[in-house]
Amino acid sequence: MNRSTYLVCITPRDAATSERLRAFLGRLQPSLTTLVDAPGVIILGDANAASLTLPGGRGLIWGHLFEQVTFARVTDGVRPALLQPADELLRSHWGGYVAIRSFGDAVEVLRDPSGAVACYHAEIDGAHVVTSRPDLLLEHGLLLPAIDWTIVAQSLCYRDLRPARTALRGIDEVLPGMMLELRAGRAQSRCAWSPWTFAEPGPQSSDPATAAATLRACAMGSIGAWVDCFEAPIIEISGGLDSSLVTAGAAAVSTAASCITFGPAEGDPDERPWARAVAARTGLPLQELTPDASIVDIARTDSADLPRPCARALSQAFDAPLQALGRLQGADAFLGGGGGDSIFCLLHSALPVVDRWLEAPPHIAPGKRRHVWSIIAIQNHLEGYGREAIAPLVAPLMSQPILETCLTIPTWLWCSGGNNRAVAREAFRDLLPAAVIDRRTKVAFNGLVHRVIRASLPTLREILLGGVLARQGLIDTQTLEAHLKTVTTNDEKLPELMALVEVEAWSRHWESLSYTSPSFPGRSCSYSATSAQAATAPVKMLSNRVAGGGCEMPGSRRRSRRSSNRSELIALASSIAWKRPSRLARSGAKARRSSIASARAAW
């Protein structure tokens, strides 16, 4: 994700900015530059980051913008087309951006469908602040950090669900494809781009050759456009299909790009032969790095400055050597195949077969619904990496043209001949080695995870069994303690255990700064005690899942693939993740309505 710093302060034109906000904006300078200073709108940002300033103080487009048809990068902010309504802008352009544009007495904040640029919103002193760095609002005291334990519980139970409401109170996210309209001091959001538009049976093409050709042209154009934006991009090749496609697209337009891959930890499979084959075929240089399990600090999280936890503890072993290489080479972007499985419709179910027989009805078929949900869910797994401190992490396969193209392809074409992601394989067959195109296996780093857990077991026991999540009642410490005594390399619950570790580290960081913390002067812990009771329902289900009780949580990929429709997921969220004791029914119902409304808006 692109987390380059921008901050927008929006006030009603007849209202003055508070003294506290003015002082805050002053403190941000000179590290941030004033890019727009117009009545009711002040925009600060990193002067070296990609952006387009609109004429007449009308606003700014933060990030990268491309033409929809030609894939050419837009470098001129005075184009009249950039001030057309949001729906038209989305049809004529794409990219990784947040557009802040003034229209009369209203200001619109539009986040592109890929979600490539972070975008958060808070209301402070009657003004609306939109930024990629909500931690600045907390660091400078404009908001007091307070953890929303309802959202933390939800993040443990439903890791693929990302509502607009974050786990820090007072901070909301403008979700991908959404637009926030600010008028007369009031904020209203609406969906400006919807995946369902392209998932309708009408626009879908059933011809395999046409689908493959369309996808190839679209993917090559999108990947090439992204690679052209950078002078020294590094592409991470896993040896799998998705990152190999990105490498092929990059090689077609750039000789400055370089590739890296990771060798195996002891006991894990070796993916380097496939990565070497891709590098040899594309002609791009390849460096082989080794993940370092010894540097993983499970008490630390790279998502500490984010307003919600991310399951990224293990990524420290990969990020540290990658950051060192990035600094050495002066990398200005990291690219990978993130999101590919979801975009290329990798569904572990029979739903595509069902779709084949449900092609005629006007409603969206079950497999295509699952395809859309899978794309939405991947948004929660594309940030929180340490390498983002050096350069943006770009997922070219999440580009709007690729999203729209893939959604128009029927699900049964994606599994043609019994091959997953079949359309993508055929689209790039002549550009990549056959061994990679026809590869079916995927590698897990269970050996590395197990080594991290065994080396950190005393610390892990301490921080989980006596930590914040335990105090909040979000985990069953007795069951978890028993499970920690029997952890093995092939344990299916290793990812869930690492997720607990990551959320614990994130929660500890913000609780240490929170006004609900026992250490915060002049405050009590009454909210934390209440939250522990409010999380009663997720407790047993979460502990059962981690400790082998046989309860599969709806947030897991396995459970998500089994769900048959959107209403089922919303019903599960309603009945499990936000269930409350009777004396908390009012606050629980409010939280439930807010979370479900956010989910519906995203879907």
Image (cartoon, rainbow, N blue to C red):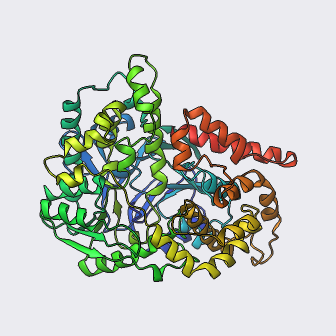
Percent position of residue 506, x then y: 60, 69
Extreme-right residue of the structure: 583
Task: Give the answer, above or below, for where 302 lies relative to 55.
Answer: below
Would residue 199 appear left or right of 281 to someone viewing this image? Answer: right
Q: What is the tally of numbered marks visible in this picture?
A: 0
Would residue 465 appear left or right of 338 to someone viewing this image? Answer: right
Residue sitting nearer the eye, 330 or 505: 505
Residue sitting nearer the eye, 238 or 602: 238
The residue under the point 17% across, 54% down is 433
Percent position of residue 234, x then y: 26, 68
The residue under the point 28% across, 63% down is 237
Percent position of residue 180, x then y: 50, 44
Residue sitting nearer the eye, 385 or 539: 539
The residue under the point 34% across, 77% down is 290
Would residue 598 appear left or right of 8 to someone viewing this image? Answer: right
Q: Quadrant of the N terminus?
A: bottom left
Task: Give the answer, above or below, for where 587 lies relative to 503.
Answer: above
Q: Is residue 58 visible?
A: no
Displayed quadrant of residue 386: bottom left
Residue sitting nearer the eye, 384 or 557: 557
Displayed quadrant of residue 560: top right
Displayed quadrant of residue 457: bottom right
Q: Is residue 371 visible?
A: yes
Percent position of residue 161, x then y: 56, 48
